[in-house]
Image: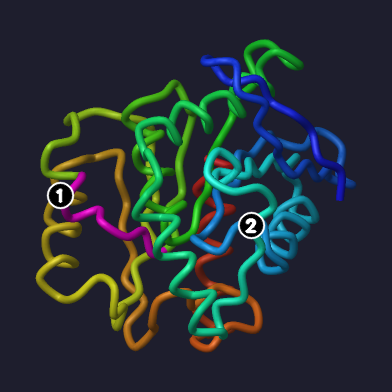
Amino acid sequence: MPIVTLTTPDGFALPALHVASPQPGARPLVLIQEIFGLNAAMHEAAEQWAALGFEVLCPDLFARQQANVDLDPTRPEEFKAGIDLMMSMDQDLAVKDLDAARQWFETRAPGASVATLGYCLGGRLAVRMAFETPIAAAVSYYGVGLEQYLPAAPAAGAPCLLHIAGADGFVPPPARAVILEEAEKRPRMVAHVYEGCDHAFARPGGEHHDSGAATLAQARTLAFLQA
């Protein structure tokens, strides 16, 4: 797939996966990775959303730490490497890097309505974009750490859709309760809980993949972004 280079506000050359849509009038979408880099799952996700009518740009958020990260979550040592990369990431800087992707779209099409969608770590960063950047809308798939971020987040932000796994081992019931309570306070934030589903239920071929939940989440995402 084509790789484009984004120039960030601090001058870093940030690689990003770019996938054009076969459909006319495709809407720009900043896709945000999981903790495993731009691996096969993210390539497949980019192709999937492109086929559904989005022009996709997926920045390599680990490029500042390590080039060409491509991890297999089924391998324990690679799973741990992903956790380590996430823990050492400067997430404030990552939000600025993602906003460079939004700006890339707007430079090419001034006034474009750019949305963002992320998984896991990307799900958290998508929500941050909703409150910290001029993104038009954000979709979060099983975002981690939202129970820490949302209570201190502004009351108003871009429209935001949360897909929450009801049996997510990384978002235990007390954390989930905080997220749902915070979403309830915000009229532009919608949260759906997928009961019985574990983390990464929408990752194709993943250990916890649930085709029914993934299909429902996709339909809800499309309706949300089209609105």
Going by the numbered disc 2, the residue's amino acid type is Val
Where residue 104 appears, as percent x and y from the top left, is 68, 21
Q: Tell me where the magenta segment starts and ends, as one range.
A: 142-149
Q: Please tell me which residue is depicted at 65% across the width and 20% down the height of the picture.
A: 7
Left or right of 205 on screen, residue 48: right
Q: Is 143 in the magenta?
A: yes
Residue 203, image quadrant: bottom right
Q: Is 17 left or right of 225, judged from the image as shown?
A: right
Question: Percent x, y for residue 78?
Answer: 54, 75
Distance CA(mark 2)–CA(mark 1): 34 Å
Reading the image, the residue beneath label 2 is: 69
Based on the displayed image, in which of its 4 quarters is residue 44 positioned?
bottom right
Q: Secondary structure at mark 2?
A: loop
The mark closer to the camera, 2 or 1, is 2
Question: In the rendered image, which residue does mark 1 sit on?
Answer: 182
102 lies left or right of 192: right
Q: Nearer the viewer, residue 80 or 16?
A: 80
In the image, residue 112 above or below residue 23: above
How would you rate the neighbour count of disc 2 (Cα within 10 Å): few for under 14, some for 14-19, many for 20 or more?
some
Under mark 1, the amino acid is Glu
